[in-house]
Image (tube, grey):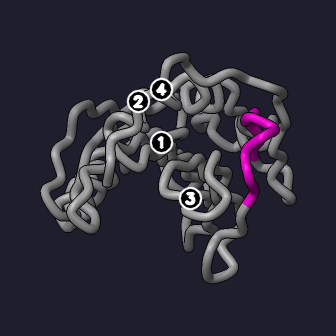
Amino acid sequence: MIEQRRESPPRFRGVSIYQDPLGRFAFRYPSTWNTFELPDGQEGALFSPEASAPQTYLAAWANRLPESVVAEDLDLLSSGMAEGLARLNSCEVLESHDDAVGNLVRLERLYTFSDDDVVRQRRVWVVYVDTWQIVLVYQGESRQEYEYWSPMGNYSFATFNLAQDLWFATERACS
């Protein structure tokens, strides 16, 4: 891959809102980015500045879980994420944050990994709320592309919102 040199940072030409079809979450993304369906009928979408090779992208999806997640599951979920990341080629975790608010659990990882002899950089939020796992991913085709497009990725993460009904599902039972 030839490293691209750009003279100016990316610019927003417009902003669109992705609203999950079942109303579980929403976030904003650059309206000029191309939209792709996720593989295997996954519930969500992928957005990329590249139409032909979307290796730099923002994606989000939701999975139904067989049972509710509670704050006490945080260590187990974090351990499972570490096991999954260890399967990636040359994975290096740059940042790791785990949070529980009520029964909402959020795992955040920033990491690099090797894919087809290219080092990619990725930021991931995995949010567990009641019986849902919601994943938000921003990936750069390379570390340079990650940095170049990071204003867009960071904006999308900052505008991520869960549905109000899901927030109510995270309240802890009073004893």
Q: Which mark is residue 12?
A: none
Q: Which mark is first along the chain, 3 or 4? A: 4
Residue 154, percent from left and from top: 55, 25
SS at mark 2? loop
Residue at numbered disc 4: 6
From what the image shows, is residue 103 above or below residue 77?
above
The alpha-carbon separation of the residues under discs 4 and 3 comes to 19 Å
From what the image shows, is residue 96 above or below residue 126?
above
The reply to whether dot 2 and dot 4 touch (C-beta < 8 Å) is yes
The alpha-carbon separation of the residues under discs 3 and 2 comes to 19 Å
Q: Quadrant of the C terminus?
A: top right
Q: Which mark is first along the chain, 1 or 4? A: 4
Residue at numbered disc 1: 125
Q: Nearer the viewer, mark 3 or mark 2?
A: 2
Front-lying residue, 29 or 27: 29
Residue at numbered disc 2: 5
The alpha-carbon separation of the residues under discs 2 and 4 comes to 4 Å
- How many residues crowd mark 3 within 10 Å: few (<14), some (14–19), many (20+)? some
Q: Which residues are magenta?
A: 25-35
Q: Which mark is residue 54?
A: 3
